[in-house]
Image: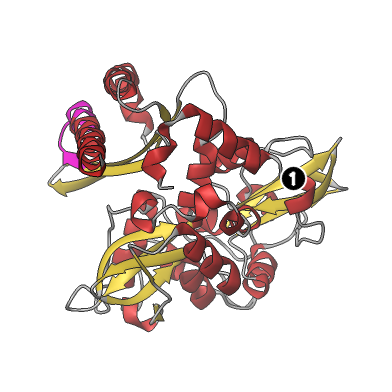
Amino acid sequence: MGAMDLEDLKQLSILRSQIDSQTVEENMDENFEAVMPEDELVDILSIMRASKLHEIPVIDGGKFLGMVSYGNVMKRKNISLETKAKTLMTSVPTIELATPLTEVAEHMMSSNARQLPVVKGNRVIGIISRADLVKWVASIRQLKEIKVWEIMSNVVDAVYPGDKLEDAMEIMRRLDIRTIPVLDENDGVFGIIGMREVIDYNYREKNRQTVGELTGVKTPVELKVESLCVENPMTIGWEDDLGKAANLMADNDISTLPVVEEGRLVGIITRYDIIELMAACRERDVVFVQITGLEDEDRYFMPALDKEIGNELTKIAKIYQPQTFVMHVAKYNSEGSSAKFSIAGRLTAGGKLFSAKAVDWDLVRTTEELMKKLMGMVNDTKEQRIDHRKRTR
């Protein structure tokens, strides 16, 4: 069964039941790393580095206070290594033992968190992560047989070995992502560069005053991407199935797999993509819609954006029932003071994932273009399905 077959509500219900038959208690980790609110960044980074963590919870007296992540650190400028956890942490949802795993997956989507605290009363009793959820996906037939190309992100920003590290970091900040592929001259996969490599390099003992040499605007030495990227990363073919991808991620403790066809990069599949598919199976009355990256000065466009998104989702619903829609807005100045918008959108409808990107000078027009691209993809999938049925009669 492929993802395009999941629009059958009965099949979605069966898949939801299979996912939610697993419990939080069965999947959470009771032995986890944590820091105190007064702990300094230098010590926090040391623990995260040693444990290969992207995020770490801040706990005081058994009570969860917040989460410190590489993403938080990267967004700050010239942070002192003496900065306390309490000033770096951000709020994420908490999970209870009775929370269905499809809902856990949705919370991970909405907060972009790699792990969430499990609480009982006021005390943290465990941590549940994307890795915990993904590792057993290969045991669910309806999921493991889905092809990689059906849920991968085919809108891929990449860099080259000779590019400046700061350019790669700017892409990660702008798109709110934590890894980016590095390509060779033939668009083959040379390596992977991520926040972990950047911060691991920039980490120093307490005699370093800041981590701003790389997280700040100015870089004393213009490092090249090739100096920090992980070369020859594990890849997967676009015709491989999701079960293989999940097993590779679980067995090698990796979150990102470049997808290749005939030696060329054609997409990226991550743990987030699998979590997104699981969240799409959650029973809900309305479509889960999330817009990220929108700056405060542009929020007055929200009514127009909501209208544009709502109109197209209504049209899409006549073909496949939408489950989730996530849109990330990146804004940058490419000519003088005029701002340009780059919007990436991901839609799950009928259990299939569609992704597209649009770029324009006008935010509403860019959103309109994005939604029309997604609508076109849904229509194309419908036509392919009809054609397939005709050929198999």
At mark 1, the secondary structure is: helix
On screen, residue 367 versus residue 270, left or right, reads left
Mark 1 nearby-residue class (10 Å; few <14, some 14–19, many ≥20): many
Q: Nearer the viewer, residue 379 or 324?
A: 379
Q: Is residue 361 magenta?
A: yes
> Is 87 situated above or below 347?
below
Which x, y percent locates residue 242? 46, 58
> Is 56 situated above or below 108?
below
On screen, residue 337 versus residue 28, left or right, reads left
- Let me know if residue 222 appears in the view: no
Residue visible at 67% across and 75% down in the picture: 50
Q: Tell me the quadrant of the picture where the C terminus can be found.
A: top left
Which x, y percent locates residue 354? 32, 42
Tell me the quarter of the picture where residue 266 sits.
bottom left
Which residue reaches farthest left? Answer: 335
Q: Nearer the viewer, residue 27 or 297?
A: 27
Residue visible at 45% across and 64% down in the picture: 256
On screen, residue 334 versus residue 283, left or right, reads left
Tell me the quarter of the picture where residue 239 sits.
bottom left
- Identified by mark 1, the residue type is Val
Residue visible at 58% across and 51% down in the picture: 140
Q: Which residues are magenta?
A: 358-368
Which x, y percent locates residue 324? 44, 32
Q: Nearer the viewer, residue 328 or 7?
A: 7
